[in-house]
Amino acid sequence: MNVVVCVKQIPDPAAPGALDPNTHTLDRSGKLILDDSDAYGVEMGLQLAAGDGDEVILVSMAPNGETSGLRTALAMGAAKAILVSDDALAGTDALGTAKVLAAAIKRAEPDLVLTATESTDGYTGTIPAQVAELLGLPSITFAKKIAVDGGSVKVERQTEAGYDEVECPLPAVVSVTAGVVEPRYPSFKGIMAAKSKPVDVLSVSDLGVGADQVGASGARQEITDVSKVEERAGGEIVVDEGDGADRVLAFLEELKVI
Ligand SMILES: Cc1cc2nc3c(=O)[nH]c(=O)nc-3n(C[C@H](O)[C@H](O)[C@H](O)COP(=O)(O)OP(=O)(O)OC[C@H]3O[C@@H](n4cnc5c(N)ncnc54)[C@H](O)[C@@H]3O)c2cc1C
């Protein structure tokens, strides 16, 4: 079984990058790391594609031929990667990104495509469904448990109330939540092996995606404004003077959580 895992390489959240004052997009010119949320997809892929001849193939779109995040996922155990990197991609919006990813994924002829539910940098949460639609494949989102059974995939799909059991034929695109599996840490042996694993670097024209579909000129979305998230208000400390429990109860009732 071929499992493709989409992995986004993002600026290190520990050193927040600058925003371009004109386009309001994140500066991605430095070293990029594997988005934490994609480590779950990589681990799930490795567990599902554990048989003889099975492979996990990574697909990523990132600037400047960046492979640092891909190497982390290769060190976890993925077999190889396809990286789409091209100056023409600067300013590409979510739909353009999905078109590029779909074209790259097609090359790997996957039985199953895994993504995270949303990335952790400039997330829209729209890529998984867009990729599925572009590939003409079924889409299951918010997977907290995945099992492949012959030619179909069975998913426990997280909902607000619990989970739904959903099944669809393969190939399919499934987005996973952080609860799906516990990602492994790359071993030293894995890190060394990852250095020589193949990364196929492709341009937009290699994929046959029209130049008018990508880049700032192909974008149908525009980031018009960016504002800071409101800081959290300070909490209230309840000093127990015999009435502590009642006051906590009243507070929770006011919030309508009980
Ligand atoms: C107007 C506009 C301009 C932009 N300009 C730029 C720019 O100049 N440079 C730039 O780098 N970005 C730019 N972006 C952001 C870039 O296009 C995003 O990668 C894209 O919007 C999709 O990412 P997301 O985080 O919204 O995906 P989400 O839907 O939140 O991600 C869900 C999952 O899809 C997969 N996925 C998402 N993106 C990728 C990827 N790139 N590679 C592999 N897997 C992926 C991952 O598994 C991810 O967890 C721009 C966005 C907009 C709207």
Image (cartoon, helix red, strand yellow):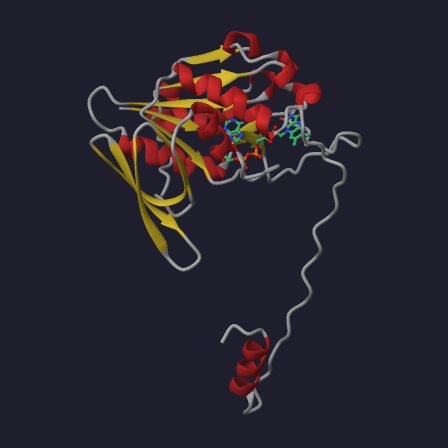
Residue at horizontal 53 percent and vertical 82 percent from the top: 249
Q: Position of residue 53 (x, y in %)?
A: 23, 19
Q: Residue furthest top?
A: 206
Rendered-image quarter of ligand 1: top right
Q: Residue at x 52, y 7 (%)?
A: 206
128 left or right, relative to 26: left
Lateral position of residue 253 relative to residue 178, left or right: right
In the image, 238: left or right of 233?
left
Seen at 59% across and 30% down, the residue is 94
Tell me where residue 29 appears, x and y as whole percent: 66, 23
Q: Nearer the viewer, residue 88 or 103?
A: 103
Instruction: Specify the quadrant of the image occupied by residue 123.
Output: top right
Tally of numbered tags: 0
Q: Vertical placement of 100 versus 137: above or below?
A: above
Q: Residue 231: in sight, yes or no?
A: yes
Outermost residue, right side: 22
Q: Looking at the picture, how far across and down is residue 80, in whole percent?
A: 38, 18
User: Residue 132, located in which quarter of the rendered image?
Assistant: top left
> Which residue is depicted at the point 50% across and 22% down?
101
Query: Residue 13 at what x, y percent from top left?
Result: 59, 39
Q: Identify the image quadrant of residue 166.
A: top left
Question: Which residue occupies the foreground of this view, 87 or 16?
Answer: 87
Q: Is residue 195 visible?
A: no
Q: Which corner quadrant holds the N terminus?
A: top left
